Image (spheres, coloured by chain):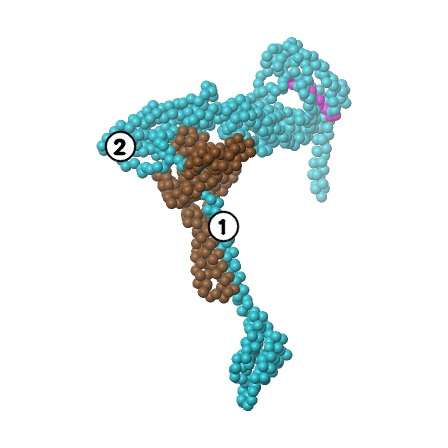
Chain colours: A cyan, B brown
Amino acid sequence: MTRGFALPFAACLCLLVALGCGAGRAGADNLRAEVDARKIGIQEQVVLTITVEGSSLPEEVDRPAFTNLRVVGIPSTSTQVSLVNGRMSQSRSWTYVLQPAAVGSAEVGAVRVRLQSGEYSTAPIPIEVVPGAVKPAPAPRSQDPFGEDPFGMLRSQRPAEPMLFVEAKPSRSSLYVGEPLLLTYYLYTRTSVSSLQFTGAPEFNGFWAEDLQQPGQPTDEPATVEGVPYHRFAVMKKLLFPTRSGRLVIPSAMLSIGIPPQGFFDNGGTVQRATKAVFIEVKPIPEESGFSGAVGKFEASASVDRPSLALGEAATLRFKVEGAGNLKWIDRGPELSVPGAKVFPPQVKSNLEVKPGGITGSRTWEFVVVPQTAGTLEVPSLAFSYFDPEARSIVKSATKPLTLEVRGGVPGAVTPAPMSGPGIAQRGGPLPLRTDLERPPRWAASIPGRWVGFAALGVLLLHGLLWGGDALGRLARASSPVAAPAGVRSALGELKRVGREGMSKEAAAGLIEKTIHRVFGAMDGDETERARAVRTLLEEVQAVRYAPQLGDYSERLRELATRAGDVVRKWA
Amino acid sequence: MGVSAVRIALVSLVLALGAPRPGAAAAPGSGAASAPAPPSAAMHAEAPASAPAPARDGTPQAQFRRAGEMARGGDFPGAIAIYQRLAAGGAESATLYWNWAQAAAARGSMGEALWALLRARELDPGDRAVARDIERLRESASLDRAELAPDPLASLARASRRFRLDALALLLLLVSLCAHAVLKWRRAGALAPLMWTTLALGLAIAVVPVAGALAHATGAVVRRGAPLFDAASPTAEAVGTLREGEVLPILESSGGYVRVEDSSGARGWALASDVRSLGSAPRPGS
């Protein structure tokens, strides 16, 4: 039990002793003033850092007097607190960037500060200012904003607002359509950067854009902007080719830049920076018949794989254009016509490489030439026209004529040529043009297939309605106890015939009976008033029909016909 | 041949009717028409009445003739520009595309010439001269027949237009409907065979234009070495080259690009200006 208490108690005591020792040491106050160089060039800056260490740190220190020096930008402040091996220390630093005013002597005056333990001061710092630049280049380790340096945050001090910006820089601002333009996106920074990315894809309207291979790690270039030294990194390069003339605009691009933690209590963050819009003047290139659209400097050459061949064999003619420019977009090769041979459309092969200076390499058009006759065939000179921006004119590069020796067969005997007629004219022949613009009349315009389909469906629907109408009518008549109007009219007409045409009493009674049956149908089991009236009438009719012929029944039959008409009118 | 002759005659008739006749009143302010024409002038005016009347400047007919003169003079781009303007303005006809094809062929644009001929065939499937030149160009470009007709349904649509199967089907269906109506209201039983026959024939013939309407839109490659891209984007990579003159089904379009499939089955995006549609007139500037 006693032993169980003893161990925690001892641990707490040790901790208190350790903290007490640490607190006692935190009272060691100190003041330092340091510059990063004692000798600088007139165009360079010197960084003054004033550091105060102690248990209580002042919020501000008086700015020292500067001789032949002026402050550039806003001074930055940073505070550091550390607890290492039980020892707590804290410090606060003020950083000034100073620019010399003239060649000669300069001085940072004494710094004075009052702390709890007393007043402290530093000695003045003399600085020699010489013409030009003398400061050594910064050490590479601290210049790499993308490098991972876990101790960098303890060594460096980040200003309140990160001093960085981005710029889109074109290699030139005026060029011809089709000429290459190198556009570089630079990051200028005086602080570490942990990440960098475009918030949206940069737009290059009016340009054909080619990506350039970037090295794995951006390289640092020192740069001075408005007197402030920066580290400059090329973050993206694009090779652009204007596709139209005029004043083209490369719009502003936004970048999101990650800042790593710069101190113990700093979590880092992300800042946004945008490039300025870039304006490019694009000059038009002249239009000329036969001009391929190529811009740059090119050399054309031609060769055949076999200068001598047998009739029936084929040779390959290669027309090669080599040089630097926008060759990638030139697809159209020369027109090749070899008298006495059939020439097939060419295949195009490219061997091009995108470089910051443009696209270099070659493009080859391979024609298959099949001789149609024996003898010596001449492949004419082939020309490639391109616009030379240096000469500011269209230049033609022509190949030398070539010959093909065709063996076998009879020289001059031409193999059967494709059919000819008054159609597509060969070059140079008369054009079989039609003279009048024959426009088809409007009524001759074809009816769209969909409309025909819809019309067919409509006709089928109408047929269905007609068929359906008949069927429904029959169904209605069969199911309804009421006769159709047409049936009533015809029944009444039948009943009027009774007794008029010298009918026998059997025939007349039969006609009445048949008419009644036709109108009312079978009424078995029906006990309605209507059925009873019809049955009574039928019984009377049948009584007359089957009665012996003992007198004149004509009056009786007319009376029955009249009653039957009344029944039909009332109940049918 | 007969159809063409009839058309030429009709056009001549229209032109003759449209020409100013002797003694007709002219527009106000026209000094020539302020006084009655003398008899001799009327006789002179009657003499050339059978010849085609001079076309007015600016009319499609006049522009068409001017384009023809330019083509004969060797100004093929100028002539083609006029043909394109006329087509975009609605003056499309097989004749227009025929001349366009001749000018394009003379300029060396075989793909454009083939496209123009195919477009002419779409407008007048019965024009045998057009069919003959399509065959000739196909052979010279070493294209297979299947490469000019990737969708068999398109042939059905052409057959429908050529033989006016659309109108015939509608006529037969209308007759069957009338016969049915008469059969119902007049109880004319003799019309039943007519009704059934016309209905069956009409439906059978209507299948052709309806099936033709299901054909894919197609376009012809008008530029030699036209690239096939992997995406509809200016920064897309070229994955192949299309054959000049080949007819391709257009699967979809996006901006200035069309998605196509070539005869080898490769699918990709091509510039809409490189693959010109066979189903409609080219847009100005394409």
Among all residues in the image, which is located at the extreme top? A104
Say few, some or many: other residues with alpha carbon within 10 Å of mark 1 (under 14 / 14 to 19 / 20 or more).
some
Q: Is A30 rendered above or below residue A42? A: below
Q: Secondary structure at mark 1?
A: helix
Answer whether residue B112 is visible to the viewer in this image: no
Residue lying furthest front: B39
Across and down, in percent, residue A572 comes to: 60, 74
Q: In the picture shown, does residue A519 fall above or below B106? A: below
Closest to the observer, A115 or A228: A228
Q: Residues within 10 Å of mark 2 (few under 14, many from 20)?
A: many
Image x and y of residue B42, in percent: 46, 35
Q: Residue at x 59, y 24 (%)?
A: A188
| Quadrant including the N terminus of chain B | top left
Residue drawn at (38%, 27%) of the image: A320
Q: Position of residue A537 (x, y in %)?
A: 59, 82
Separation (CA) of disc 2 from disc 1: 54 Å
Q: Amino acid at mark 2?
A: Thr
Residue at the (55%, 31%) spot, across then down: B29
In front of the other: label 2 or label 1? Answer: 1
The foreground one among A55 and B80 is B80
As drawn, A119 above or below B33: above
Q: Which residue is mark 1?
A: A450
Q: Which residues are magenta?
A: A46-56
Is A47 one of the magenta-colored residues?
A: yes
Q: Whole-percent x and y of residue A373?
A: 26, 32
Secondary structure predominantly adopted by residues drawn in magenta = strand
The residue singled out by tag 2 in the image is A373
Residues marked 2 and 1, same chain: yes
